[in-house]
Amino acid sequence: MIDDCKLIEFSQKGDERGHLVIIEGNEDIPFDIKRVFYIYGSDHDVIRGRHANYNSEFVLINVSGTSKIKVDDGSSQRVFDLDRPHIGIYLPRLVWKDMYDFSEDSVLLCLASEHYDAEEYIRDYDRYLEIMKKGKTANNA
Ligand code: TYD
């Protein structure tokens, strides 16, 4: 599952007037975009996220500034640097994510496959590990 977290490079149409980055739902990213939110003004030492989602897939893009995304599937972890406005990270369902190391000018744009539903968030890491362990056992049965 950690291998399903992937950096995506979006097409750019820059010219003498500046840059333009294009992201089309179901084309550049593997889902229909149902929700958009963005995070800015987070201090350098803040850790956001700290959750997994049962249903939502995400693509995260630092349209300004930089941040780091740590992904965790209960067995392994990986850290991605978001440091260019035309690069996104795709996060599948059920991946635990931490967003941190925000630059002062960081604007982290998040595209989601689902509308907001607090019930589909797993916010307790021990519970997340249990859910992932159960899933593994079920898959191996
Ligand atoms: P939270 O999930 O803690 O943000 P992050 O993942 O960046 O750490 O969300 C902060 C608050 O905003 C929380 O009360 C839930 C609410 N919220 C919504 O109402 N809709 C949304 O789409 C999101 C992402 C959050």
Image (cartoon, rainbow, N blue to C red):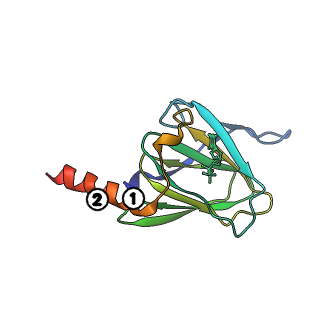
**Going by the picture, which residue comes out furthest to the left?**
141
Q: Name the residue type under label 2.
A: Lys
**Front residue of 8 and 63:** 63
The residue at which mark 2 appears reads as: 133
Relative to 113, 16 lies left or right: right
Query: Is 120 above or below relative to 3?
Result: above
Relative to 57, 88 lies left or right: right
Q: CA distance from mark 1 to mark 2?
A: 10 Å
**Front residue of 50 and 11:** 50
Sequence-wise, the earlier of marks 1 and 2 is 1
Quarter occupied by residue 132? bottom left
Q: Within 10 Å of the Cα at label 1, are there few (<14), some (14-19), or many (20+) other Cα atoms?
A: few
Q: Name the residue type under label 1.
A: Arg
Q: Residue at x 80, y 62 (%)?
A: 104
Q: Residue at x 56, y 44 (%)?
A: 59
Q: Is residue 23 visible?
A: no
Q: Position of residue 12 (x, y in %)?
A: 68, 40
The tally of labels here is 2
The residue at which mark 1 appears reads as: 127
